[in-house]
Image (cartoon, rainbow, N blue to C red):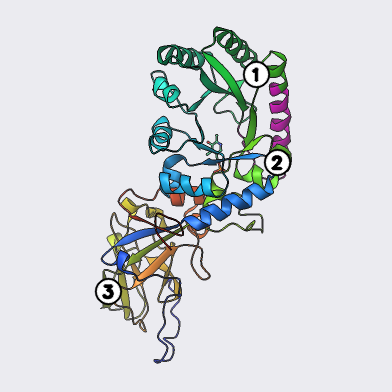
């Protein structure tokens, strides 16, 4: 039942070592688990995406703490790479960007009645409206603050999530015209989001695109003077040039992960996040000794195990038990037994020379390292969730930018 590939120990003169990319540097001393965030990769990925959509501006989507990578350092790296807009779902993250001194265009889009629209308007943050009540709250906030609010009207072209659907779009457009005439609101954008952009051949992609441009035409006929029309997420940026419009909105691709893993092309993107840990304990266990809660794994031979101090509180999925890939001693192995809240175990094999303190890599982008996509495949999810769920207690160490030197 061993799921561990136990290779030969190799000649004694050349002990198995992790690849040269593993840093064993003073700043990681004593850390149990940490994520290295390569800001040069973010910058490179944004530049790569801009080259793919050369006549569009680029909004770097940095919601959810920049997909777990760290909001401010990533936002600054994206701007260095040529992003001219930043986007977040939640207002608080847009406020954090502005309050940190970032002056670029910002869009935030997920509101409920009572959201701090005044805080957004006073910070010159663009807002999204999918329904008349949102426009009313924005208008009231703008009047209170004494500024004109910048608004993007969102049309549901078939995602069936946010946005005004069907005839509701006409109502939203007319309502926006009234508020524009009052001078409290200015509609600067129209936008939508795809349901199936990650399936390059899916017929809904073109149908949504057609519906979007119809909706835009209606808004313009009604007298709205739009600065930006936008609909392309990462997948559309990479594989649907006809959807680039005035502005593309990639998220996952700026982190170097592909939204279309079934397409055999990395588009020149470089993964920005590498998750590493130090072994907390290495010890011998006899054949048959069950490992970790529930004894879901037992070695078939006398072996050496390593305790990895990272668990589901750190974002290691519990359903990675017995399947999550890890690079240890320069070799790919698989989690042995259950992932616990703070730790899991590796069966390093009888020939292991590992010692407490050695670094193991859960995922990254260097040759031989498992990828976030490998973790997604092993745990039946998408790479987005693997990086975004990284726990708040995992330190992010920045390299490749001013935040981290190098
Ligand atoms: C998250 C999000 C994006 C980015 O999506 P990716 O698939 O990560 O590129 C773009 N637009 C909206 C509205 C989003 O919510």
Q: Let me know if residue 37 appears in the view.
A: yes
Q: Disc 2 versus disc 1: distance between alpha carbons?
A: 30 Å
Please tell me the numbered disc located at residue 356: 3
**Left or right of 299 in this view: 265:** right
Looking at the image, which residue is at 43% across and 79% down?
Answer: 6
Q: Nearer the viewer, residue 371 or 335?
A: 371
Tell me what residue is drawn at x 41 percent, y 79 percent: 17
Q: Residue at x 60, y 45 (%)?
A: 234
Q: Which mark is drawn over residue 55?
A: 2
Q: Residue 138: x, y in percent? A: 47, 17
The answer to whether residue 395 is above or below residue 161 is below
**Residue 71 appears left or right of 40:** left
- The residue that disc 1 covers is 166
Q: Is residue 1 magenta?
A: no
SS for tag 3?
A: loop
Which of discs 2 and 1 lies nearer the camera? The answer is 2
- Image coordinates of residue 367 in percent, x first then y, are 53, 70
In this picture, which residue range is highlighted in magenta?
193-216
Circle nearer the N terminus (2, 1): 2
Write down the quadrant of residue 223 in the picture.
top right
- Closest to the observer, 79 or 284: 79
Q: CA distance from mark 1 to mark 3?
A: 61 Å
Q: Which comes before the other along the chain, label 1 or label 3?
A: 1
**What quarter of the picture does the N terminus occupy?**
bottom left
């Amino acid at each position: 039942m061993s799921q561990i590939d136990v290779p030969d120990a190799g000649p004694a003169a050349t002990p198995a070592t992790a690849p040269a990319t593993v840093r064993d540097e003073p700043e990681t001393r004593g850390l149990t688990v940490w994520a290295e965030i390569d800001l040069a990769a973010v910058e490179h990925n944004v530049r790569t995406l801009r080259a793919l959509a050369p006549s569009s501006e680029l909004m770097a989507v940095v919601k959810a703490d920049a997909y777990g990578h760290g909001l401010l350092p990533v936002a600054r790296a994206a701007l260095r790479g040529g992003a001219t807009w930043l986007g977040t779902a939640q207002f608080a993250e847009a406020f954090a960007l502005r309050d940190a001194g970032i002056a670029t265009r910002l869009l935030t889009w997920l509101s409920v009645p009572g959201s701090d629209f005044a805080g957004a308007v006073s910070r010159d943050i663009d807002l999204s409206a999918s329904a008349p009540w949102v426009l009313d709250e924005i208008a009231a906030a703008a009047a209170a603050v004494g500024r004109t609010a910048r608004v993007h009207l969102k049309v549901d072209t078939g995602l069936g999530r946010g946005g005004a659907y069907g005839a509701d779009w006409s109502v939203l457009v007319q309502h926006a015209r009234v508020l524009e005439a009052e001078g409290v609101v200015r509609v600067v954008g129209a936008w939508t989001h795809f349901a199936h952009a990650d399936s390059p051949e899916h017929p809904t992609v073109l149908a949504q695109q057609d519906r979007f441009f119809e909706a835009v035409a209606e808004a313009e006929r009604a007298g709205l003077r739009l600065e930006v029309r936008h609909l392309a997420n990462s997948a559309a940026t990479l594989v649907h040039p006809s959807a680039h419009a005035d502005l593309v909105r990639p998220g996952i691709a700026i982190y170097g992960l592909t939204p279309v893993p079934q397409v055999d092309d990395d588009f020149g993107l470089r993964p920005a996040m590498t998750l590493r840990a130090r072994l907390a304990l290495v010890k011998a266990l006899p054949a048959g000794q069950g490992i970790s809660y529930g004894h879901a794994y037992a070695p078939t031979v006398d072996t050496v195990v390593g305790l990895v101090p990272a668990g589901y509180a750190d974002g290691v999925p519990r359903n990675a038990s017995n399947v999550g890939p890890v690079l240890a001693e320069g070799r790919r192995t698989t989690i042995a037994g259950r992932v616990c809240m703070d730790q899991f175990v590796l069966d390093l094999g009888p020939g292991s020379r590992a010692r407490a303190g050695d670094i193991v890599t859960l995922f990254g982008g260097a040759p031989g390292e498992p990828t976030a996509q490998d973790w997604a495949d092993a745990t039946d999810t998408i790479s987005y969730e693997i990086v975004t769920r990284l726990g708040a207690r995992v330190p992010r160490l920045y390299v490749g930018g001013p935040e981290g030197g190098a």
